[in-house]
Image (cartoon, rainbow, N blue to C red):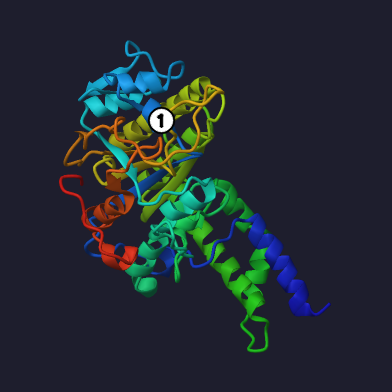
Amino acid sequence: MSKSRRDFLKLSALASGMLFVPNFLHASQGMGLLGNSNGRRLVVIQLSGGNDGLNTVIPFEDDLYYKARPSLAINSGKVLQLQNGLGFHPSLDKMRQLYDQGFLTVMNSVGYPNPDRSHFRSTDIWHTASASDEYLKTGWLGRYLDSCCTGSSAAHMALEIDDSLSLALKGEKYNGMAVQDVRRFYQASQDRFLKQMAKTHHHDAHEHHQVDYLYKTLINSQQSAEYLHQQVRAYRSNQEYPKGEFSKNLKTIAELITSGVESRVYYASLSGFDTHIRQEAQQARLLQELSEGLYSFVQDLRQHQAFDDTLIVVFSEFGRRVNQNASNGTDHGTANNLFLIGGKLQKAGIYNAAPNLADLDAGDLKHQIDFRNIYATLLQNWMQADAGAVLGGSFKALDKLV
């Protein structure tokens, strides 16, 4: 076996083990926020599996809701009432507190034309901001990086708190970075063998391009690990968070933000929402985990005066069908609710009308708001980016949102 082949195999294994992601740019390479960024950041939370929106934001005054779900509907006496005949699932008490404080906007019936009920395809559509019959290889947040990065002098960070990178954060020129634990990532990067490989590597015109690429990835990852470690090593959040992986990931994001890491985008997920059977207990547990984790996260940011510059978006790839199924669950549907959480919302509360259960599309909710209009609003009004360049189309920003 040739030396290049051996090096390639070694580096491939090491890159996989250390969660290396190419094109991650950091402060030591001259990273800085663009002049018009105002230091704002976006935190995206994905509820993977298709959360049942009708049992999350409940139309408790609508008889059609109870008719469609004779055993699965939430009793009106247990609903955490909001306004306009809508209320939260009883597990969302902490989110109800954020709502009462003016920190939460509920957007109803969010979706897209000709919806797809496949988890994988619908997730791709949300990640890439594509039409339902369009297949893109880059994500909307990755294209945001492509649009706003002008070489190393104005690069932006995007971090996913996970062990793999979602399509949403993959661009043509720049990618985000996936890291589960900053301290473990740094420790792995300090491996003596890895450091020696990075130190002694010199580009050779005859070297296999894949080997050279992996060496560069190794070097970038080591530098990135060093930067993150330097930022967070002296800080530990003293905010109490619930137990569980999701809350732990939110705490990691809070520590990164309050440590001064200049990332513009953070991404995290909570999975398990594919509730075809015995939905009641499973969804209640997940919604409580979501609600309590987000509440602690908000308190953490507020404690460090970082909340007003942070906007949290909570979405799921689709909702569920209006009628319950025979297994006390719900099957894949279409439009769903979406939440915005922040200290600078222009229209906190219920943003638009409740779903019309008397006007369905073959048993599914019709979407009122195209999710790409929400993306356009976030990009243009919050992140101060060129939404048209990122989304590749003319999607009008929504009024009185952010």
Nearer to the camera, 213 or 281: 281
Where 106 falls versus 388 (above or below)?
above
Rendering coords of residue 259 (x, y %): 38, 47
Rendering coords of residue 157 (x, y %): 40, 59
Nearer to the camera, 204 or 169: 169
- Work out which quarter of the rendered image holds the N terminus and state it: bottom right
Which residue does the image show at 51% across and 26% down from the upper left? 325
Specify the farthest residue to the bottom: 205
Which residue does the image show at 67% across and 68% down from the upper left? 196
Q: Is residue 196 left or right of residue 390?
A: right
In which image quadrant can residue 27 be found? bottom left
Rendering coords of residue 302 (x, y %): 28, 35
**Label 1 Cα neighbours within 10 Å, binned few <14 / some 14-19 / many ≥20:** many
The amino acid pointed to by label 1 is: Val
Which residue does the image show at 32% across and 14% down from the upper left? 76
The residue indicated by pointer 1 is 322
